[in-house]
Image (cartoon, coloured by chain):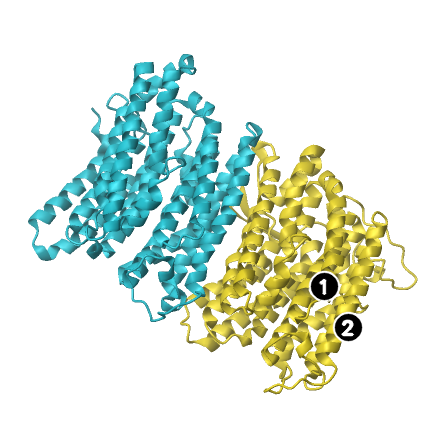
Amino acid sequence: MSLLNSIFLLPLIAALVLVLIPGNYRFVIRSIALLATLASAVQAVRLFLAFDPAMSGYQFQESAPWAPVLGIQYRAGVDGVNLGLVLMGAIVLFAATCVSREITRRDKEYYILLLLMGGGILGAFVSLDLVFFYVLHELALVPTFILMGVWGHGEKKTYATYQITLYLSLGALVALAGLLALYLQLPPAERTFDLVRITSHFEAAVMPAATQRAIFPLLLFGFGILVSLWPFHTWAPLGYGSAPTAAAMLHAGVIKKFGLYGLIRVALPVLPEGAKAWMPVLAWLCLGNIVYCGWVAMRQRRFDLLLGNSSVAHVGFAFLGIASLSLVGVTGTVLVMVAHGFLAALLFGLAGHLRQQRGEVDMTALGGLAKPMPFFSLALVMGLFAGCGLPGFANFPGELLVMFGAWQELRWFVVAAAWGGLVIGALYALRAIRQILHGPVTRSDTEPRDIRGWWRKLPFAALLACLLIFGVQPQHLVGPAQDAVAGILKCRPPEIKKPAAPNKAVWPPASTRRNRP
Amino acid sequence: MNLSLISLELAVVALGVIVLLMDLAAPREWRPASGWLAMLGLVGVLGWSVWGGLPADGTAFGGMVVADGITRFFHRFFLVTGVLVLWLAAVHHDDAGSGAAEYQVLTLFSLAGMMLAAAAGHFAVLFVALELITVPFYVLTSFQRHRPASLEAGAKYLVLGALSSAVLVYGIALVYGATGTMAFDRLTSLTPPLTGNPLLTAGLLMVLGGLCFKIAAVPFQFWAPDVYQGAPVPTLAFLAVGSKAAGFALLLRLATGALPALALQAQTLLLVLAGATILYGNLCAVRQPNFKRMIGYAGIASAGYLLMGFATLNRAGVAAMLFYLGAYVFTLLAILAVFGVVARAAGLEETQSLAGLGQRSPLLAAGLTLGMVSLAGVPPLAGFLGKFMLIKAVIEQGATNAAFYWIAGIAIVGVVVSVYYCFAVIRTVYWPAEAEDLSPLAAGRWSRLLVVVCSCLVLALGVFPGPLLNWIAESLRALTPA
């Protein structure tokens, strides 16, 4: 099994192995799940380190025939756009498996479903064939439904479960119609679902602008629903609030990025004219995400609903970067996707710990937890600060790049977004910190316990470390992403003069640009 | 007279006669084995059809019987369906009460009719095949004589089936009156000057109506939920898969063999029927408390999807239809094999009887989940690929007729609705609103094996569709509109 395949096949194979293990071997089941996801994360790190930023195009390519009659084959590879996503996805999957300790009943089914979900989405991120790309993402649909239903919580659990399932299947099907429409634009003799060949075909023979404008909304709204684009976002906050911790981490952190990734990977390179025509619409809608959902987040009393809404608000930045259609903006989106994946997983994981300790997440009923729960509080404060774009965390360079990229074309949108994302974001983040961590300790029957032991701290520490690493050294993501995005937008990466001092707006510094002519 | 082209049909009929005679002659204690005998016999016929070196393409009886790739596909498809249905019947043989052997014999005779339908090259054969399918079904439907619902279903099917046969025969008579022939190959050469003939058009519309009754398409679908609800579980499976597929086999024979030009003219009509069928079936299936009735409505929706593929009248659409059918048989059998066990244990046929199955029997729950997910058309299972191919074929035709885009939209809406009701079953299985009985559910070894076989095939056809796709492409090589 090659490095790339092993990243997503290890969880899937582990899921199959778990099917054969009797349900009462709980320790064995959990160990297998942990080992498989850890191995997958290690492989993802190895992939990230082995990636050569000086090379253009896809690396670690894999292919195998699948259904030649239908023009479908297995093809996979990574470039700067999905490199970070694969790393983030594998680490979040491992973290989600770690925090699944809270699950105390029907573990076997739980871990099988969790591994299917995680393995599927990792596979979707590396697939370069439209059908595999789609199918591997959809692998998460049924597990999400059952995970939320059986292990979820809250009195609106069933409603939220149906809502998320129906919304996601609708979005996926609309996107599928768009993907099929793309496929059918190829001349009959050359029809294939191979994304690389589709892209190169349409680079040579550009599709008529009217056709592009007709197909683009299918992809925009199809993928948009999957990423909770305003006004199709209502499934997200309630869904994440009702899901078990690991499912919320995986979904908000990783699976939701699929739609954004699809827009960047499929829609932008193949339908440049369509993108130009529809970007004003996207720019307005993403303001809905950033400002409106930020506003809604401010009014939440439940911490998990606050996180859900703020996560919807954050993807607005990613949309804004795409809407700018500029090299800097789309590169920023790639960074925001990775950063927000780590962040959402961290915060939902913390919310899960909070619920486990206090039995509720209503912020007005909480308070004074900083003293009894120091590690939890540290992680929470850092996470919430990262969310409001504090420098030093990976979100900051991402959001900054997005704003720089969008400034040229969408000046007022940037102003609104900065206000919405940074001011409103800071407001609800600070208020959450005050209400949960500060003030008098609320009385309860049980003493709140911190996250104790290094193995329990590990998932949170790993996620925080990633946020910090990519916050301080974003060029490891930005360098490769910039080259890939330049290929997608068909513009040349800017020739960067060696800056006098490292500046976050100019990537990558000369020291990281190995072997570049 | 070239009997070799109908040797498979003859073999199935002979098997039926053997089972019947065995029931008369064999000692009483051997009788329960007749179900397994019938099933293994069919497995033998299936093996013969694959490796027996049967004659390749050709016609017999003056063109009344045709053998080509489509015939071979449907022959094997019906044999597989027959094997699975008899397996299901064998594990449920005590449901039938007395006369289990008659149940198997009638199933075999009906199966022979389906296989003959796949080879029909003449309106007379078409009619004979249809009657051979339908008449045993009147009995199979009402086999549980102690259940009023079963008797009611049989009576309904008898009355409406007879009506539809009458319409069909009338249509055939009109076609004959207009053209002077009933042979498909001669109609092909006659048709061009007759396209505007009102008599022919009326006749063909009536034939279409008769066939729509078979496949349970709107507006001839009313019998399906009632009959499905009353029929015994194996009959329901056979009716939903075999009888429906036979209707489509005949439609294909008619459209490709007899009247390609006229069929193309009827494309919009077919699309309207398909759209209405998809919407009706899916919307009515929502919130059906009776599981078999819900399957009935889901079956109507499936007929709509298949009709949509048929309406393209090209190779991609027909290939998609055949793949969908191949996926459908395993999907439905997986679902019904589980439901049969649960319903018998609970003594009730509401979806509620499945409550808590996830804890009562994880294996059956997993099989049912795979089946329902495939029925809804969610990746990576076989049902998804079937719907994917159908929608792809339909969008491909959008350039010729904008109605195809609409039907693709309707199909997508239909899938979302079906996700709702199919996932509602999964919900009942894993986290029911109220579950009284969580005691472990015992299922026989052969029932479990049937569930495992069907659900593994549902998964396998979704993950490794290559062989089936290649075989379908092979079967359709001779199909005229590419």
Determine which quarter of the picture holds residue B256: top left
Give the foreground label among 2 and 1. Answer: 2
Q: Position of residue A374 (x, y in %)?
A: 70, 83
Chain letter corresponding to the colour cyan: B
Confirm whether residue B48 shows in the render.
Answer: no
Query: Which residue is the site of mark 2?
Result: A430
Query: Which residue is the site of mark 1?
Result: A339
- Left or right? Give the position of A236 relative to B276: right
Q: Residue at x 74, y 71 (%)?
A: A384
Q: Residue at x 30, y 47 (%)?
A: B236
Q: Chain of mark 2?
A: A
Determine which quarter of the picture holds residue A424: bottom right
Seen in the picture, residue A222 relative to A248 is either above or below; the reply is above
- Are tags 2 and 1 found on a single chain? yes
Determine which quarter of the picture holds residue B305: top left
Q: Residue at x 45, y 46 (%)?
A: B282
* Mark 1 nearby-residue class (10 Å; few <14, some 14–19, many ≥20): many
Seen in the picture, residue B242 relative to B294 is either above or below; the reply is above
Q: Position of residue A282 (x, y in %)?
A: 73, 48
Q: SS at mark 1? A: helix
Q: SS at mark 2? A: helix
Q: How many marks?
A: 2
